[in-house]
Amino acid sequence: MTWALRFGGAGLVAMAAAFAAPLQAAPGFDSWEALGEALFFDPNLSRDHTQACATCHDPNTGFVDPRETDLGRAVSLGDDGHSLGVRNAPTASYAALTPPFHLNAEGKWVGGLFLDGRATDLAAQAGGPPLNPVEMAMPDESAVVARLRETPEYVAALQKLAGADVFDDPARAYAGITQAIAAFERTAEFAPFDSKYDRYLRGAYQLTREEDLGRLLFFSQQFTNCNLCHQLKTSLVDPAETFTNYEYHNIGVPANPALAHMAAPDRGLLENPLVDDPAQAGRFKVPTLRNVAVTGPYMHNGVFEDLRTVVLFYNTYNSRSEARQINPETGQPFAPPEVEGTLSMEELTTGPALEDVRIDALVAFLKTLTDARYEGLLE
């Protein structure tokens, strides 16, 4: 059963009801994907039974967290009802296509899950939130496994899929949980490739003049630098483009003044235990632009609310106009970088300043990257 069938037209109302009581598991989880789907929506795997993977990665809103907190939607609320995260929850859309965390031939860090790549692969990422004290807040792997064992259908499914003795070792059983969730996240539910852009590539949609101008600007290094970081494939018509090269860059994002609970600047990639090079401070993984128009707020700290503001922010590196240095959301100049000294200036300063018509065209093109089921969320 897919999430679409489970929640149907009731959408968030049905999700809220599902989170209000333990999920009633349907019998016959005969595949890793089916078991993972059930676990993805089950709040019983959190300490206070209030939070599931789907809480912060809501399938009805582009797999991001739609909940408002005292800080808006910049960060997520924890299972205890008062703890707050320190980063904006990235979309889980297309996350399964992320390569493992590694150094490429050019000596650059690439891939990995979370904004600093600290989870090598999707299963490792799935294992993080249940044990995070400000997220799902379970004390250890054994406690999560004990919660799973409260549902006989889960027990039977995991024994069938991973072996009858899987529960003899809590670490092995926990790995089974993360494997199942990862398997569900690899399904087409998360990566349908059915946006207007995809339909355009298949000849099933005609881009508007504004959208087409935005497309040309996006892929042109003469006019913008977008595709330096937000294009993975070499072909401009590749049907599996994820709109990220999965590298890490410091683009000078300002601190979010709303996040007063942050004790220090976020060092990004340097928070990854595998990375100790100070030159990596302030670098974050280039996010996919799939569904970007419906998955704000933006940047690792949710500092920008509007997609057009993000494009204007990038434009500050190429414009000498004082007016172009103003953040339209605050009426003040864009604030300085949260982390100085490691900015990717070569990538940021490629291309001329853009006038309003081209900025609007880029935004229009970015909206075409929205999966069909979320087009109703576009403004």
Image (spheres, rainbow, N blue to C red):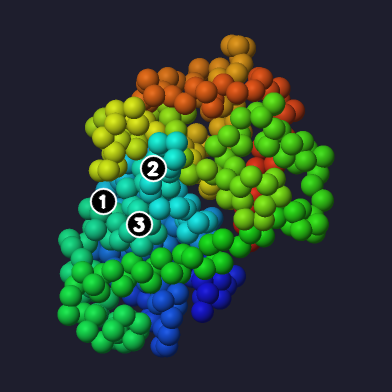
User: Where does label 1 land, which residue?
Assistant: 134
Amino acid type, mark 1? Val
Local packing at callout 1 (Cα closer than 10 Å; few below 14, some 14-19, many 20+) is many
Q: Give the percent coordinates (x, y) of residue 60.
A: 53, 61
> Image point 81% across, 57% down: which residue?
203
Is 263 placed left or right of 56 in the picture? left
Is 279 placed left or right of 96 in the picture? left
Is 259 placed left or right of 308 in the picture? left
Q: Tell me if label 2 and label 1 are in contact, CB under 8 Å.
A: no
User: Where does label 2 land, which residue?
Assistant: 103
Q: Tell me if label 3 and label 2 are in contact, CB under 8 Å.
A: no
- Residue mark closest to the camera, 2 vs 1: 2
Evaluate whether residue 283 shows in this view: yes
Disc 3/disc 1 C-alpha distance (Å): 16 Å
Amino acid type, mark 2? Leu
Which callout, 2 or 1, points at the residue further toward the start of the chain?
A: 2
> Image point 31% across, 73% down: which residue?
176
User: Where does label 3 land, which residue?
Assistant: 125
Amino acid type, mark 3? Gln
On screen, residue 208 above or below 188: above
Is 62 placed left or right of 207 in the picture? left
